[in-house]
Image (cartoon, rainbow, N blue to C red):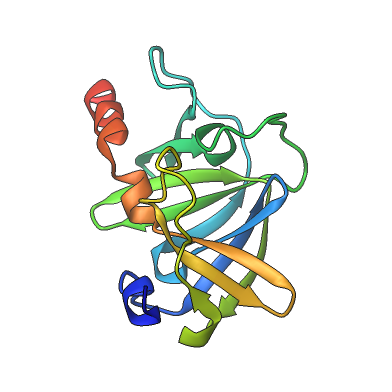
Amino acid sequence: MAIEQATSGITNNEFLTFILGHEEYGIDILKVQEIRGYDAVTSIANMPEFIKGVVNLRGIIVPIVDLRIKFGLPDVSYDAFTVVIILNLGTRVMGIVVDSVSDVLTLKSEQIRAVPELSAKLDTRYILGLGTVDDRMLILVDIEKLMLGREMELVDEALA
């Protein structure tokens, strides 16, 4: 796959990077509204396990998604480094829980590679590509596609 095709979903080359487990991820910085420490959330019955609950953010009810649970990572725990990234996704505001925030990085197109074809069982729909910075490899996530999928529509129905 050509680099142009691999990066066709990338409109901005500036990424907020964060840690989940042992991996480093990047999301489009333009989707980030703010970064907050992890606080208690209000749980709502019958939500998928990865939905921790909701918070009231200046009068807006914001669903909080734990990406560690959504990605099936073991040993989900909360500590002083755990943060919530508040996302502005068009008309929706959502939060994602991550282990920690790393950097804001600008990647040149030659630093972004296509996702290799690994397995038909592996869902790569939400991965824009792999970014490389020195000896670091970043998994670049299409956070809008990930957060606005069908299972999140179920959350909207439950909150309505």
Using residue 20 as the reference point, say whether residue 142 is left or right of it.
Answer: left
Q: Is residue 10 above or below residue 65?
A: below
Residue furthest top in the image: 45
| Residue shown at 36% from the left, 79% from the top | 2
| Residue shown at 74% from the left, 74% from the top | 135
Instruction: Name which quarter of the figure residue 74 lies in.
Output: top right
| Residue shown at 43% from the left, 37% from the top | 121
Using residue 54 as the reference point, say whether residue 16 is left or right of it.
Answer: right
Q: Is residue 1 above or below residue 48?
A: below
Q: Is residue 87 above or below residue 5?
A: above
Is residue 109 something one can see in this rendering? yes
Tag count: 0
Q: Nearer the viewer, residue 152 or 7?
A: 7
- Pick the quarter of the image with the N terminus: bottom left
Measured as percent of width and height from the top left, residue 85 is found at 53, 52
Q: Nearer the viewer, residue 71 or 103?
A: 71
Residue furthest right in the image: 80
- Pick the quarter of the image with the C terminus: top left
Using residue 157 as the reference point, say whether residue 155 is left or right of it.
Answer: right
Measured as percent of width and height from the top left, residue 92 is found at 28, 49
| Residue shown at 73% from the left, 49% from the top | 22
Is residue 108 something one can see in this rendering? no
Measured as percent of width and height from the top left, residue 60 is found at 35, 42
Measured as percent of width and height from the top left, residue 107 is found at 53, 82
Using residue 6 as the reference point, say whether residue 95 is left or right of it.
Answer: right
Q: Nearer the viewer, residue 148 or 55?
A: 148
